[in-house]
Image (cartoon, rainbow, N blue to C red):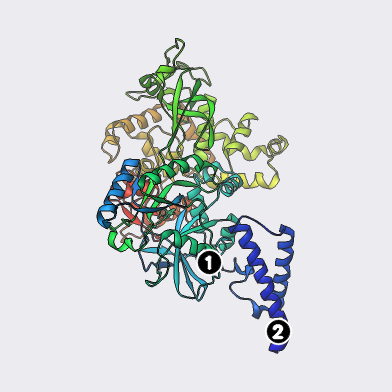
Amino acid sequence: MSNQFDPIKEKIENLKQLLTQWEYQYYVLNSPTVSDFEYDETLKQLIALEKQYPRLVTPDSPTQRVGGKASSKLAKITHQTKMMSLANAFSYNELRKFDNSIKKESGLNEIEYCLEPKIDGLSVSLKYENGFLKTAATRGDGLIGEDITNNARTIKTLPIKIAYKEPIEIRGEVFLTKKNFAKINAQILDKDKKFSNCRNAASGSLRQLDPKITAKRNLSLLVYQIINKNEEDKIKQQSGIIEFLKLLKFKVAHEIKVCLGIEEVINQIEKFNVIKNTLDYPIDGVVIKVNQLDLYKTLGQTSKFPKWAIAYKFAPAIVTTKLKQIIATVGRTGRITYVAKLQPVELDGSIVSAATLHNAQYIVAKDIRVNDWVKVFKAGEIIPKIIGPVVEKRTEKLAKFIPFEKCPICGSKLEKIGDDVDQYCINNDCKARSLQAIIHYVSRDCMNIEGLSIKIIEKLWDHNLLKSITDLYELKNKKQEIINANLHIKDKMFDKLILAIENSKKQNLSNLIFALGIRHVGSVIAKKLAQIYQNMSNLMKVNFEQLMATKDVGETIAKSIVNFFANTNNINLINKLISFGVNMSFLTTSNFEKDSIYYKKCFCITGSFDIPRNEIKMRLEQKYDATVVNSITNSVDYLIANDFSSTKYKKAIANNIKIITEKIW
Ligand code: IVH
């Protein structure tokens, strides 16, 4: 029998080697040697043979990259050696200080450093045994990570089999190329669901429960560290580690440089700064590592960072451009936000043509004028901001900015409310206001009407089919009109939308209160009000003093609520909603886990999970009667995290807020 199998086995072996070699050339070396067609045809041959002889399928076969099944939960993996982070430097002087301390500790006059790009992805630990990838884990909190072996196997730059038989742990960074990131985001139509940056997208893709989804995302891997290198090993330098990893057919960064002395390092960083936007992978700095590995023990580490390395973070890019126009936009509460229209300019790899100016007071305080030259900067993913005008460049006599007096959309007089610095359009019929009000009403944290995207709402608006919140509940009577209006809404889609609208009638009172868009009433206050007053008619009757006696409700919120219910337009809206059958009561289930430490607590979430956040929110609400908010404030008790570099995470740590990594929902 084995005789009969041998030629086949050999054929399979040859095909596997060929395909592995081609993948390496294509993904790691970036120099394909065969056409996609030839690769696909050969892969098909292998698939057919393996199908015929399943016993000959081995884990290192290129067909087995997406072999793992979807799981319901990622298992935990305890790291044998803590996955550390890096100390940061933001100036060259900090680097010189770092260099001095290394010289002092080591007793050497000059230090050799290995410079590597700091890739903005997620660090992973890969363990190989007998030459085969055994486990892949995320960093997690540094001590315990998640088992992402099946997902890691789908990464084409990760060799599943290496020519090294000893157990070895290799660490590196999983990331998305800028091109793939753009591609993934382009496929997500819902604006709210798009990934805010490359790193989040990589994290979401790597931590999928179904490897098939990860495979589609085309993640990449660059490696830079070996953990359990034998003492007697011949490699003496970090640059040697990189060379060794290259030999093992891993992908390493091309831009690695060895420098003697810190001034050469600084020189090299300047060069990195110039080329950083031309690289296809996202980098947020440069990692400077002592090259001599035998110094690592002497230099040691703190509880968080090794003392033999430091990350130099690039300063945010600043450009000067001309401010062509100041416009005002109107939000759902009527609040005016000023925006600067700029002469398009390249900033950190993208073209910037607008920047936020907040409110009129901000513009006046900075004395920003139309036709001024302004300095613009972008820090990370945040939209561009203006530092201020370049006064020396003001050649003509430019008129001082005068705040708008009228709403740019409906022309009604803008008002200031109380001590608020913002201006408001208080015309309830203003198109901008009512359009934004509808968008808010249907959004995830409000009535959660799925499928009703901003685009569709705008189209329905333009066709006079949806002018107010109450029109939503009459759309079901306009099927033919909508289908005939050429809005790309077909029969099935229409039925789905109507079902989502009908289902929204069952939403809890807390969602409805938030959805009404009462100024200063966010989702947390809305939930509190719903719990205390139990139904809409109680809430409508409440007076200022009663509200002031409510925990967390201050004067501004109390006034705003009283004003809202004093307005007949709002009363009419609520009465109409009642007539459509929208739920007006606070729904509680008696199944809350009242003994849990999470009962009635306030949560915030950071990172991507296997289920959407609104689903997590709903489950937490149903299980613990919890409140879930979008940002870290004093009222947050727990941060549910799996993005350990997010601002929320940092804020939570700084404020001693407890971090949860378990899936408690
Ligand atoms: S070395 C003990 N090298 O940056 C330090 N890290 O901010 C091990 N990173 O957690 C890390 N590129 O995820 C190292 N060339 C590089 C890196 C790199 C990106 C990440 C890594 C680390 C984080 C620290």
- Report which quarter residue 661 is drawn in: bottom left
Q: Earlier in the sequence, mark 2 or mark 1?
A: 2
Q: What's the CA distance linking mark 2 and mark 1?
A: 31 Å
Residue under label 2: 5
- Please name the amino acid that badge 2 sits on: Phe
Vertical placement of residue 419 versus 615, above or below: above
Q: Where is residue 133 in the image (x, y as percent from the top left)?
A: 51, 70
- Ligand 1's image quarter is bottom left
SS label for mark 2: helix
Vertical placement of residue 445 versus 10, above or below: above
In this rendered view, identify the residue nearer to me: 361 or 24. 24
On the question of residue 581 being in view, the answer is no
Vertical placement of residue 195 versus 20, above or below: above
Q: Which residue lies furthest to the bottom in this view?
A: 1
* Callout 2 touching callout 1 (CB < 8 Å): no
Q: Where is residue 551 in the image (x, y as percent from the top left)?
A: 27, 41
Residue under label 1: 248
Q: Residues within 10 Å of mark 1 (few under 14, many from 20)?
A: some
- Report which quarter residue 534 is drawn in: top left
On the question of residue 222 being in view, the answer is yes
Q: Which of marks 2 and 1 is in front?
A: 1
